[in-house]
Image (cartoon, rainbow, N blue to C red):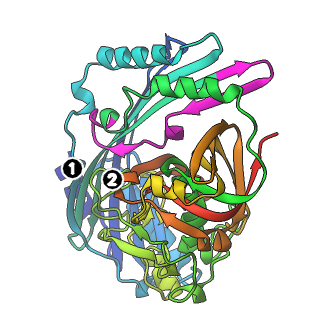
Amino acid sequence: MLKDLEQRFRTVAPRADFVSLRFVCERTEALSVRQDIVQPVQTAEDTGVMITVLDGGGIGYGATCDLSEAGLRRAASDAHDWARRSAGRTVIDFSKIAMPKPHAEWTTPVQTPWASVPLGDKIALLREQCARLKTDPRIVDWSSGLYHVGTESLYLTAEGGRAHQRFSYLVPSLSATANEGSETITRSLGGRGFCRQGGMEVIDAVGFRTAAPELAAEALALLTAPNCPSGTMDLLIAPDQMILQIHESVGHPLELDRILGDERNYAGTSFVTLDMFGSYRYGSDLMNITYDPTRPEQFASFAVDDDGVAATKEYIVRAGILERPLGSVVSQARAGVAGVANARAQSWNRPPLDRMANLNLEPGTSSLDEMIAAVEHGIYVKTNCSWSIDDSRNKFQFGCEWGRLIENGKLQGLVKKPNYRGISESFWRNLKMVGGPETFVLMGTPNCGKAEPNQVVRVGHASPACLFHQVDVFGGE
């Protein structure tokens, strides 16, 4: 079918400065068991193409799910028409952008394919793990789930570029909610953050088969734990909360289209300006952030982005200094700065825009015990449960599911509803210690939203545990 599609594209591609086709076929399956009851299986398939035309300085798109020659011809004609209509009216002269002509392949490494395990066996696994969450009458809601996405894409250019990519994504989930009187507490498996590329082997890599009893025990223990104390103190953050910290206070403010003003009427701007790159101190010397869509098992890895740019690992922040934005080939041309391969679209019927893929905090040298020992008075927190950040992606406030006091270098009792807030530059500049490779965890989020019309994409994050100094911490009274 792809060979036929390629031939049809070569036949219908109009004479223009640049023409590309992006084919996407995505199949999803969601399985869940809640309160020991199997929920309806949800499956979906979505297939179509986007044709992009650059001509005379303008740009146009045409999308269709009709993959016949006639359907592709109509989409190509629409795209060419819009390119000619937009010439002279766009934010940049698109004829000056050298669009890539890739030659690439990508296939997610899979040990146990999703389809190779019978549906009944997957349901039995979810039943087993769901039942293990119900350890006490005070557990009032409990669930387990698996969400799989299989995606095949083909990117073609009229000049002969070709990139074929096949992806397998898996998102496991566990959740236990405990209630006693007016108090309700939820503990989850990383807040759905343990998502990766791969097959059924992912569930063992992230501890899905063993986590349920501990999550239930923690939810019950938190019911009677005191509220998190308020004050300025040290904050030790586990990887499953660090991924949200990286996502909101580093990833979104460094998306170059946002810096250029494209998101102002929807999700705000950024406190970052173009003159900061190369000199601005974003954090302490221990802060090293990389953009790395090349790790095979990480959630948002690929060979090329949706504009055909080859994926490479790049430092975004090195030793605390801001080096480059998350800007695709078009945004790079608009801003005159180097960026990364991060033109990404939700599906075939959306144009690509600047998005995070795998944005990681590189590990340091400290052990978890060393970081705990370095704290005179502080809190250790895990697993995000709430987030808020201002329109410039600068001031933030985050809440976590789990907290534990640290006093005089030793872990003390549990505290519930820990929250903290800060301002990006002062927060990251107070990064005091960074965990070593043994604390480094690959995670991500399956539902990062942006743009109008809205696009939801998969984002990978990896981080060690980190210790921050002098953070404003407060409880959820």
User: Which region of the structure is painted magenta?
Assistant: 178-202
Q: Please give left or right for residue 433 compared with residue 75 in the image.
A: right
- The three-letter amino acid code for the residue at tag 1 is Leu
Query: Circle 2 sits on which residue?
Result: 23
- Which of the numbered marks, if any, corresponds to residue 449? none
Query: Which residue is the site of mark 1?
Result: 2
Judge from the rendering whether residue 46 lies leftward or rightward of residue 107; answer left or right: right
Three-letter residue code for mark 2: Phe
| Image-quadrant location for residue 151 | top left
Question: Relative to residue 448, is residue 256 depicted above or below?
Answer: below
Ranked by sequence position, the earlier of labels 2 and 1 is 1
* Residue in the image at 34% along x and 62% along y: 293
- In the image, 455 versus 385, the foreground residue is 385
User: To which quarter of the image does residue 17 belong?
Assistant: bottom left
Q: Regarding mark 2 in the picture, which secondary structure is present there?
A: strand
At x 51%, y 69%, the residue is: 82
Q: Which quadrant: the C terminus?
A: top right
Q: Residue furthest left?
A: 3
Residue sitting farthest toward the front: 408
How far from the left and from the top, in percent, is residue 330?
46, 77
**Which quadrant of the figure contains the N terminus?**
top left
Q: Are marks 2 and 1 in contact (CB under 8 Å)?
A: yes
**Residue at (19% x, 38% y) in the render:** 111
State the separation of the CA atoms marked 2 and 1.
Answer: 9 Å
Q: Position of residue 221 (x, y in %)?
A: 63, 26
Q: Is residue 126 visible?
A: yes
Query: Is residue 200 one of those drawn in magenta?
Result: yes
- Left or right side of 187 for 100: left
Residue 40 seen in render: no
Q: Position of residue 174 (x, y in %)?
A: 49, 28
Q: Residues within 10 Å of mark 1 (few under 14, many from 20)?
A: few
